[in-house]
Structure formats: C-alpha cells, structure tokens
Amino acid sequence: MQAALAPMVEREAPPRVVAFVERYLPRRLGTVATVALLFGSVWLGIVKGGHAQDVSAALSDTRNALANAAGFRITAVAINGRKQLTQDEILAIGGVTGRSSLLFLDAAAVRDKLKANPWIAEATVQKFFPSQLQIDIVERKAFALWQQDGRLSVIADDGAVLEPYVSRPFLTLPLVVGKGAESRARDFLALLARYPQVRAVTKAAVFIGERRWNLRTKDGLDIRLPENDVGNALASLSWLDQDDKLFSRDIVAIDMRLPDRLTVQLSDDAAKAREDLFKDKAKAKKKAGDA
C-alpha cells in the first residue's frame, strides 16, 4: 500500500529576512545591476577596440561645451615671463585649447605639462572665475651650443638641451664639444671669461675624455690645456700673447699638459723655414771654419 504523499506547502520567508532585504538593499537593485553590467560590457568593448582615448576626449569636449555654455569659457589669458616661446606655443604645451573651459581645467596638470618642456624652468597656473586664466613662467636662457656625435644643440647653463640648433639667433653663442661638455660648460666658460684675450680668439672648447679641455682658436690653433690648474694655464697664455704675440705666430698646436713646460708645434711651412734657417747657419759656420 503506497503511503499518501503529503501535500507541498510553500513556506514564506521569515519576517526578519524580509525586513533586512527591504531595509538594506535598495529598491530596483536588479535594474541598477543590469544597467551597470551593460555599461561595463560596452566600456570593455571600447577599451579592447582601442577607442578609450577617443571616447574620453569626446566626453571631455562635451562637459567643456556645457561649462562654456554656462559662462565658464576662457575669454582672457595672461602669460608672463615668456621670451623664447610664443603665447600659442605655451598654450599648446599646456594643453589649453579653444574648447577648454575654466571650470574643468586642471591647473596642476597644465603646470606639469609646462615644466616638462625644457625651455620652462618653473610655471604657475592660476584660474580666476568665471573666465580668466593666468600663466607665469620662468624660462631657461640659451647659454651655449653643444656639439656631440655630429649633432648641434642649444643648451641652458645647467646643461639641459633646449632644442636642436636650427636658427641664426643662437649663432653667436659659445661652442662646446664632446661628451659631458654640456654639464661642465658653465664653470669652464666662466673661468675662460676671466681671460678676455684668450676668450676673444677661441672658436670652440673641446672636452677631452670627460676630464680636461682643449681650445680651438678661430685660426685653427689647437691649445691642449692641463687637467688641473687650468686658470694658471689660461693666465700664461694671456701673458705670452701680450708679450710675444703667441696667437699670431705660425704654429698649429700648444701643449700645456705638463706642469713644467710648454710645447709648441710649428706649422709645416714654419718648420721647413726653421730647418732651412738652421741649415744656412750651419753652412755659414762651416765656411767660416774653412776660411
């Protein structure tokens, strides 16, 4: 005899559980979760498709447009301290465009972009609502030209490369050559400036082996300076030129690397003339002896 099956009774949730759900879980949670899942799926597709930057830019343009329509358009820009850079260049470096709104402009981000440019040593960005932007910058100064591996660059006095050399306004800057010369140029050129007679004839300062300098004059004379006591060597050059017209002589090199001597290398023509002079003297002496 089969046992009678007990009828199934649907049990209601305990009142405490129902109260907890109603109290702590927001209404329409399912709808919110569905929308969030849908948005997440769309965003994942955008990221995987490589369109995240375009979408972000579009959203930024939209919010800026709304802010501009509300009266936060940048209508006045004051830029102080610029010399080499133009106003348009500064705004472009900072990422400030005609679509930017003052409301959503990130002043710290603009400042960081400006300071990342080698010409700009310091920058301050201030917003004056509703529509004025002020940018104060401190520019580095073009100090010298630096030649390395056949490339010529404009450098600041701290050795920072400002830009490749392409324009004539920098043609009169002193020229330093060699690896490491850009970071040592300020101190050496300051020392050289104390001896204007030597500085006036110098075309380039060449850093040798990252430890000492050579001077190349405008007439092609190569002056090999010592590693130490450079000031004394420059002073000696100045005295020798003043007393003996050293830089006007027919020589191609002066070696000052040894502390107790100065060696001069004559040009080929001067060396031949010197040799011929000695020969003539020797002949004259021989004739005098024969007589």
Image: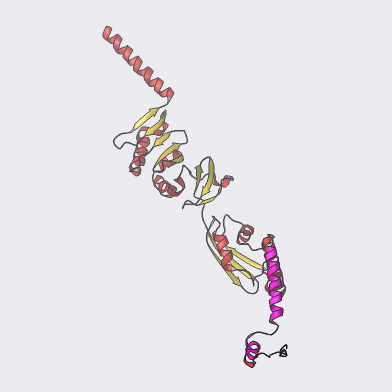
Q: Is residue 68 visible?
A: no
Q: Is residue 147 above or below residue 288?
A: below
185 relative position to 101: left or right: left
Which residue is located at x 43 percent, y 23 percent? 268
Q: Quadrant of the C terminus?
A: top left
Q: Nearer the viewer, residue 66 or 260?
A: 66
| Residue 60 x, y percent position in the rendering | 68, 67
Q: Is residue 162 on the magenta stretch?
A: no
Q: Is residue 18 above or below residue 174?
A: below
Quadrant of the rendered image containing residue 213: top left
Point out the residue furthest to the top here. 291
Which residue is located at x 68 percent, y 70 percent? 40
Q: Quadrant of the N terminus?
A: bottom right
Which residue is located at x 60 percent, y 71 percent? 127
| Residue 228 x, y percent position in the rendering | 33, 43
116 relative position to 58: left or right: left
| Residue 148 x, y percent position in the rendering | 50, 42
Q: Is residue 194 above or below residue 61?
A: above
196 relative position to 9: left or right: left
Q: Main secondary structure of the magenta part?
A: helix
Q: Is residue 29 visible?
A: yes
Point out the residue furthest to the front here. 1
95 relative position to 119: left or right: right
Coloured how? secondary structure
Q: Nearer the viewer, residue 268 or 153?
A: 153
Q: Magenta segment range?
A: 17-46
Q: Is residue 39 on the magenta stretch?
A: yes
| Residue 186 x, y percent position in the rendering | 43, 49
Which residue is located at x 37 percent, y 21 percent? 274
